[in-house]
Amino acid sequence: MLKNLEDLIKTIRDRKNSSSDKSYTNKLLNDKNLSVSKVKEEVAELIEAVEKNTNKIHESADVIYHLLVYLEANNIKIEDVMKELEKRKNNALR
Protein backbone atom coordinates (compact mmCIF):
# COMPACT_ATOMS: atom_id res chain seq x y z
CA MET A 1 0.00 0.00 0.00
CA LEU A 2 2.69 2.54 0.94
CA LYS A 3 4.62 1.44 -2.15
CA ASN A 4 2.01 3.32 -4.21
CA LEU A 5 2.75 6.48 -2.24
CA GLU A 6 6.49 6.01 -2.66
CA ASP A 7 6.00 5.47 -6.39
CA LEU A 8 3.90 8.64 -6.63
CA ILE A 9 6.57 10.67 -4.84
CA LYS A 10 9.23 9.25 -7.17
CA THR A 11 7.13 10.10 -10.22
CA ILE A 12 6.60 13.66 -9.00
CA ARG A 13 10.33 14.07 -8.43
CA ASP A 14 11.08 12.60 -11.86
CA ARG A 15 8.68 15.09 -13.45
CA LYS A 16 10.32 17.92 -11.51
CA ASN A 17 13.63 17.06 -13.14
CA SER A 18 12.22 16.55 -16.62
CA SER A 19 11.67 19.22 -19.22
CA SER A 20 8.47 17.71 -20.52
CA ASP A 21 5.92 20.48 -20.93
CA LYS A 22 3.34 17.81 -21.77
CA SER A 23 3.30 16.60 -18.16
CA TYR A 24 0.49 17.96 -15.98
CA THR A 25 2.66 17.30 -12.93
CA ASN A 26 5.53 19.26 -14.46
CA LYS A 27 3.15 22.13 -15.20
CA LEU A 28 2.01 22.18 -11.56
CA LEU A 29 5.60 22.03 -10.33
CA ASN A 30 6.56 25.04 -12.43
CA ASP A 31 3.49 27.16 -11.76
CA LYS A 32 3.20 27.67 -8.01
CA ASN A 33 0.02 29.75 -8.35
CA LEU A 34 -1.65 26.93 -10.23
CA SER A 35 -0.39 24.39 -7.71
CA VAL A 36 -1.70 26.28 -4.68
CA SER A 37 -5.06 26.91 -6.35
CA LYS A 38 -5.38 23.20 -7.13
CA VAL A 39 -4.64 22.26 -3.50
CA LYS A 40 -7.32 24.69 -2.30
CA GLU A 41 -9.79 23.45 -4.92
CA GLU A 42 -9.21 19.78 -4.14
CA VAL A 43 -9.49 20.30 -0.37
CA ALA A 44 -12.80 22.10 -0.90
CA GLU A 45 -14.00 19.24 -3.12
CA LEU A 46 -12.99 16.70 -0.46
CA ILE A 47 -14.87 18.60 2.24
CA GLU A 48 -17.95 18.70 0.03
CA ALA A 49 -17.62 14.99 -0.77
CA VAL A 50 -17.41 14.12 2.93
CA GLU A 51 -20.41 16.29 3.73
CA LYS A 52 -22.44 14.67 0.94
CA ASN A 53 -20.93 11.21 1.47
CA THR A 54 -19.93 10.91 -2.20
CA ASN A 55 -16.60 10.43 -4.02
CA LYS A 56 -14.62 10.64 -0.76
CA ILE A 57 -11.89 8.24 -1.89
CA HIS A 58 -11.48 9.90 -5.29
CA GLU A 59 -11.29 13.37 -3.76
CA SER A 60 -8.90 12.17 -1.04
CA ALA A 61 -6.56 10.85 -3.72
CA ASP A 62 -6.72 14.20 -5.52
CA VAL A 63 -5.83 16.05 -2.31
CA ILE A 64 -2.87 13.78 -1.59
CA TYR A 65 -1.53 14.07 -5.14
CA HIS A 66 -1.85 17.86 -5.29
CA LEU A 67 -0.45 18.32 -1.79
CA LEU A 68 2.60 16.18 -2.62
CA VAL A 69 3.17 18.18 -5.82
CA TYR A 70 2.82 21.45 -3.90
CA LEU A 71 5.29 20.31 -1.26
CA GLU A 72 7.81 19.21 -3.89
CA ALA A 73 7.39 22.45 -5.85
CA ASN A 74 8.29 24.34 -2.69
CA ASN A 75 11.24 22.12 -1.78
CA ILE A 76 9.48 20.60 1.22
CA LYS A 77 10.56 16.99 1.37
CA ILE A 78 7.98 14.48 2.52
CA GLU A 79 10.77 12.74 4.42
CA ASP A 80 11.18 15.87 6.56
CA VAL A 81 7.43 16.03 7.16
CA MET A 82 7.48 12.38 8.26
CA LYS A 83 10.36 13.10 10.66
CA GLU A 84 8.36 15.96 12.15
CA LEU A 85 5.34 13.71 12.62
CA GLU A 86 7.54 11.07 14.27
CA LYS A 87 8.95 13.71 16.60
CA ARG A 88 5.42 14.81 17.53
CA LYS A 89 4.38 11.23 18.16
CA ASN A 90 7.35 10.73 20.46
CA ASN A 91 6.55 13.95 22.34
CA ALA A 92 2.92 12.94 22.73
CA LEU A 93 3.97 9.68 24.40
CA ARG A 94 5.73 11.51 27.22
Image: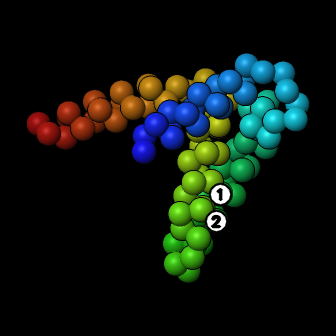
Figure quadrant of the C terminus: top left
Quarter of the view holding residue 32: top right
Task: Give the label on residue 45, or none.
Answer: 2
Q: Report if the CB atoms under discs 1 and 2 are less than 8 Å apart.
A: yes
> Mark 1: which secondary structure?
helix
Residue drawn where x is 52% and y is 78% of the image: 53
Residue drawn where x is 44% and y is 26% of the image: 79
Q: Which residue is mark 1?
A: 42
Q: Amino acid at mark 1?
A: Glu
Q: Is residue 90 left or right of residue 31?
A: left
Residue drawn where x is 59% and y is 70% of the image: 55
Q: Amino acid at mark 2?
A: Glu
Residues 76 and 66: in front is 66
Query: Does the image show residue 54?
Result: yes
> Mark 2: which secondary structure?
helix
Quarter of the view holding residue 93: top left
